[in-house]
Amino acid sequence: MLKQRVITGTVLGFAAIAAILALPPVALVVVFAAITIAACWEWADLAGVQSRVQRGIYCVFSAAGLVALAAASGFHDDVVNPFGIRLILVVAALWWLLAFFFVKTFPSSAVRWGASWTRLAMGWLALLPAWLAFAFLRLQDHGEWIILFVLSLVAAADIGAYFSGSAFGRHKLAPAVSPGKSWEGFWGGLVTSAVFVVLVHQFFWQQMPLPALLLVSVVTVLASVLGDLVESMVKRFRGVKDSSNLLPGHGGVMDRLDSISAAAPVFALGLLLATW
């Protein structure tokens, strides 16, 4: 399984880097949209929708939601509407605050979100704003590098959490949701990501003050942990280990986007507040 994870992860990593650096903004945004719809297909199953037709309908409405977000953000006129984007990202951030309450009080919180339609709505709140965040970031100057920074930040936190948790993990972070995660892993991931941010600022991104970049990045990492826990919570409620078996050793598309789905809108909102 570890060998499969490494091979699949390497292939996905190189493919992502190539697409982000090589594709023009519009093409990359379309690719992000396709990935989002694929994740929505898997999320519909996590929501308890068994019918392929109904899952397809959910994906159609999800695509319509992406078009609506693009229109509200001004992308169709090539004039970005920062107020509209900020409002949508604030709603996404508020959703993740509510999701933290759900994770913290699981399994008793399931009575509030366990209905299939509620879980379907949760999928939209988790995935659609993440697409908007990546689209917005790509349209910035050097947006491709900003996106790579966000993905690398989440990866640094994951790697730090894995090794510190494996070596020192004793105290469970959220045993009812994800028994494998520990507080030691959490702090290890946070420290690793902070070191990564300092190095990036020192050598590549000095335009933004280090305290501001660190603050936005730390909050982004916290959101990425929450995104992972929320999907784990929904999978545990659904009684499945992975969102699908599409990616050998990694599960499904949603299993790769869980952390990023929370990290991207939080980072984009932080960047908006810090620079606009």
Image (tube, rainbow, N blue to C red):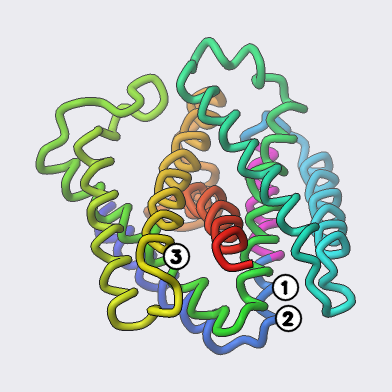
Q: Nearer the viewer, mark 1 or mark 2?
A: 2
Residue 92 shown left or right of residue 200 in the figure: right
Q: Which residue is mark 1?
A: 30
What residue is at 64 percent from the left and 37 percent from the top? 94
- Residue 122 sits above or below residue 26 on the image: above
- Out of 188 and 199, give the one closest to the viewer: 199
Per the model, the C-alpha gap separating discs 1 and 3 is 18 Å
Position in image of residue 25 (x %, y %)? 68, 82
The residue at the point 85 percent across, 69 percent down is 74
Q: Nearer the viewer, residue 186 or 9?
A: 186
Asked if disc 3 and disc 2 are in contact, CB closer than 8 Å, the reply is no
Earlier in the chain: of badge 3 and badge 2, it is: 2
Q: CA distance from mark 3 to mark 2?
A: 19 Å
Q: In the rendered image, which quarter is residue 64 located in?
A: bottom right
- Label 1's element? helix
Q: Amino acid at mark 2?
A: Val
Q: Give the residue pinned by disc 3.
A: 151
Identity, as a three-letter code, of the amino acid under mark 1:
Val
What amino acid type is highlighted by mark number 3? Leu
* Residue 104, position as x, y percentages in the image: 45, 21
Is residue 89 or residue 122 the one in the foreground? 89
Q: Please state the extent of the stretch shown in magenta in the rendering.
A: 33-45
Badge 1 or badge 3: first in the primary sequence? 1
